[in-house]
Image (cartoon, rainbow, N blue to C red):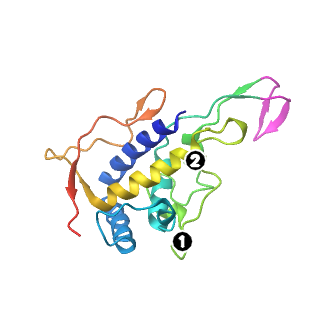
Amino acid sequence: MAGHETTTTTLSWAILNLLHKPDVQEKVYEELLNEFSERDQIIPLNDILKCNYLMATIHEVQRFTPVLFSAIDHTANVDVENLRGYKIPKGTRMFPQFFLMNKDPKVWKYTNEFNPDNFLDEKGVFQKNQNLTPFSIGLRACPGENIAKMEMYLVFANLFRRFKICPPKSGIVPPLDKPQVGFVVGNPFFEVRLKKRGK
């Protein structure tokens, strides 16, 4: 999957998630305001990586609303006699399910709610989680992963530092549980208002 598609789809999911969670949006903004006092400055990538709550929020968007239902299929190259009670014959095609992996209660503290604390330690420091694999892993990992991450961090930080994302005048915000399924898991059409931050 192209890095640009990942960036734009994840960003639109981020906006929709934060419309539902205005408290998270304000925490992201407060962190950015503390780190970057000049509203119109371009925030560089190296400094973005130091923003713990921002990084946790971006990763939580990828966990809670992944852009793909499953990874590219794999084929078992040996017979597996017992995988959690199942026998998998050699040659079986398997599709790793991101939606299921990202909601595993054995892995995530907050499984069915959007909560950046899934990626923060007790001191509020961002912690990567190896169980989050939005770009897949191994030889079939997305070749555009690095550029997609850089774009995502830069766009996300610079947008949310300058603007508050508000619901449209109608007040209608679509639910998060009705994705548009295609090559990627897109969100339903929605409108927002951008309110320029005063500071």
Q: Is residue 47 above or below residue 170?
A: below
Visible residue check, residue 53: yes
Q: Nearer the viewer, mark 1 or mark 2?
A: 2
Visible residue check, residue 134: no
Q: Residues within 10 Å of mark 1 (few under 14, many from 20)?
A: some
Which range of residues does the magenta coloring cover? 76-91
Residue 30 located left or right of residue 104: left
User: Residue 81: x percent and y percent?
Assistant: 85, 34
User: Residue 153: x percent and y percent?
Assistant: 46, 54
Residue 100 located left or right of residue 43: right
Residue, disc 2: 146
**Marks 1/2: CA distance?**
22 Å
Residue 107 in the magenta stretch? The answer is no
The amino acid marked with disc number 2 is Asn
The amino acid marked with disc number 1 is Val
User: Residue 180: x percent and y percent?
Assistant: 39, 30
User: Residue 137: x percent and y percent?
Assistant: 67, 42
Work out whether mark 1 precedes mark 2 in sequence or the reverse, and give the earlier one.
1
SS at mark 1 in the image: loop
Residue 52 located left or right of residue 93: left
Residue, disc 1: 125
Q: Is residue 14 above or below residue 126?
A: above
Residue at 58% in and 54% down: 105
Q: Nearer the viewer, residue 183 or 38?
A: 38
Q: Quadrant of the N terminus?
A: top right
Residue at 37% in and 43% down: 12
Q: Quadrant of the C terminus?
A: bottom left
